[in-house]
Amino acid sequence: MAREYSIENVRNIGIAAHIDAGKTTTTERILFYTGKKHKIGAVDDGTAEMDWMVQERERGVTITAAATTCFWRDHAIHLIDTPGHVDFTVEVERSLRVLDGAIALFCAVGGVEPQSETVWHQADRYGVPRIVFVNKMDRVGANYARVLEMMKAQLGANPLPLQLPIGEGTDFAGVIDLITQKAMHWDTADQGQTYSELEIPSEFQDEVDQARETLFESVAVEDEVLLEKYLSGEEITHDELVATVRTATLSGTLVPVLCGSSLKNQGVQPLLDAVIDFLPSPVDVPSIEGTVPHPTAISTRAKRKRDATSQEGEAGEEGKITRPADDTAPFSALAFKVATHPTVDKLVYCRVYSGTLRRGEAIYNVRSEKRERVNRILQMHANKEAVSDAAYAGDIVALVGLKETKTGDTVADAKEPILLESITFPDPVISIAIEPERASDADALEETLEKLMDEDPTFTVGIDKETGQRIISGMGELHLEILTDRMVREFGVNARVSKLQVAYRETISTVAEARGTHIHKTDEEGIYGDVLLTVEPLERDEGFQFEDNTDETQIPRQYIPFIEKALEGAMGTGPRIGYPMQDVKVTLTGGSYHPTDSSEVAFEAAAALAFENAVRKANPFLLEPIMRIHITVPDEHVGKVIGDLNARRAQINESTTQDASDTARASQSTQSVVDAFVPLSETFQYTTRLRSMTQGRGAFTLEFSHYEVVPESLAPGANPIGSA
């Protein structure tokens, strides 16, 4: 089966933003206007196509990233709608890892909010080009210019407005396209399917002229030919303008900005045009880079073939290799998501970077070094699927039959394997103990927890060494609430859960030295390991560092990797209570060995003992997770909210009142925005407390920020590991 569309006509994009910015509402309109569905769904009444989970429809929030494919202007758009809630940031992280471009949605009232910043910087990290859609221009308090200023100040972005709103708030009536110089008005009778392009209203002409001048100045700087034309007063054509904006978008120097109201069906078609015009196809982004995992396993013939043509990838320094987005190159793909399925073992979502995969073929898992056969290839539309015979470079598909493949694994051609960069996920910050209600539920609970961990790398399961309790950890209250709800409703497992517990960390405050020896002698054999090391504190969030200052006469070189491995393992249990340690540097300063009795195991044991002795002498203390909290509250309640935050040991960063200059807004209660840092332990059940203080009119979001020292008077005592 040949390609239905060329790879140049493919767009792999995601929609990402702060919670409640309108991502799913915008996706519904995209599906409607592209003909993917024939009726617009709504988040509030639980009919949104992409929010297919029961929990999503009940709560009105997106929980899992949902993928679909639609068509616009003869282009295939592989679209992923991501969650906005910080508890499900894993879905955004792994989606951005495999996407070529993104639509960043900002609320015209709230502007750049905390989770917006998080998503933006995630996209920065993966080098994902973006366009911006300022949504909810019809809302009272909408302020387009303010959002642009916030993008500059808070994101360090260089926004390029391509549209101006015709009015704001209740006066919003359409948009003015600065490139075509037309005013666009949507027909409300047919849900915005048709729109008219009219002359610009005279009262907006001066503003449009100024905005176009700024547009030409910004674009001209990006191209020497255009700059010369601009300075000499020559006209810059439409095609030149679009091409240069596209080039600047792909390089990240400019970010095109459009506006509209998805809920009122205004502005979505130009957004789709901007996706085609300005966001990259798979061939517009750099070829994926990886490493050759087993150079000795690659045949000489394959090496010659790879070196002879760029179609097979180009080898670089230190075993680096690239694979172009080409159907004829060796197959390579990244598994970015695993999902359970009611009729098959599981679905593995993959982004194909190079080559062609056909149904029934065997592929090679580079991590596990195992071959697995692809039974089916599926094109997904939320939780619905369509069977495909093949997947090509640039495609995002779900594969059936990969039992051993996990999130972040590379699957490739066994003859010419490549190891792609995996995905890094944040550590969980909150825990609860969970036990089966009956002994007969124990096996089902274990199986369910394994499936959920496969799906979600930020969900972990461990055993409390002192109590034997099973501890599950996640990114927040809602995260664990959703997972435990799924256990009951989706997997039919009955379990008891304890109160929420904070995932503390431990570290040290002073330098200390200690020796560890593991020496035993029997009639048959001897065991000898002797390690001297120093521990010292690092700056916060620097993790673990190891340095070897010994020589061959003290400890033979072959034992050093085993010592480092043992020390990394020892970091998992701190001396105070048993929480994982962080921000510690260990320097191996001495030791001794026996020519016949020394072994890897002996040095591992000696290193662990030396580390335990050293950190106990280095004044260990606890760290607690600090969350950034962003609260929107009616102005008359802001005093109570700030007072309550102070009682929760919060550090108030900023409290601002949103501008109420327009008449419509001034007639309503103004809103204050409070931005603060607060310990996670002080936020449990905060939803109920905020509702009580604000008569149900306050809203907040939380996201993890950093770890800070727990005041000694508030530090938990020597409780079991995992309890708060």
Image (tube, rainbow, N blue to C red):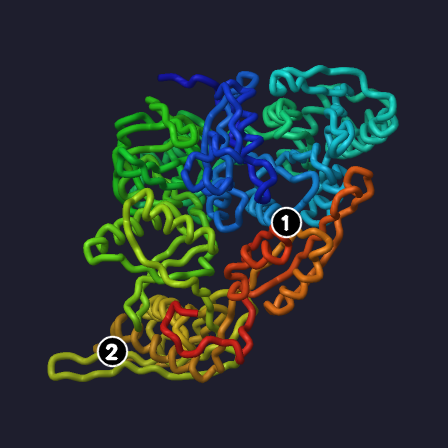
Q: Is residue 112 visible?
A: yes
Looking at the image, which is closer to me, 148 or 237? Answer: 148
Residue at horizontal 61%, vertical 16%? Answer: 190
Q: Residues within 10 Å of mark 2 (few under 14, many from 20)?
A: few
**Do tag 1 and tag 2 residues touch (Cβ < 8 Å)?**
no
Q: Residue 378 at x, y = what percent?
A: 35, 28
In this picture, is 93 found above or below 413?
below
Q: Which residue is mark 2?
A: 595
- Which quadrant does the C terminus fall into? bottom left
Residue at horizontal 32%, vertical 25%? Answer: 358
In this picture, is 618 found above or below 109?
below
Q: Residue furthest left?
A: 523
Q: Residue 300 at x, y = what percent?
A: 31, 37
Q: Which residue is mark 1?
A: 697
Q: Tag 2: residue type?
A: Pro
Q: Is residue 698 left or right of residue 533?
A: right
Q: Nearer the viewer, mark 1 or mark 2?
A: 1
- What is the secondary structure assignment of the residue under circle 1? loop
Which quadrant of the figure has residue 356? top left
Q: Residue 518 at x, y = what percent?
A: 27, 81
Looking at the image, which is closer to me, 126 or 147? Answer: 147
Q: Residue 120 at x, y = what percent?
A: 60, 45
Which disc number belongs to residue 417?
Answer: none
Q: Residues within 10 Å of mark 1 (few under 14, many from 20)?
A: few
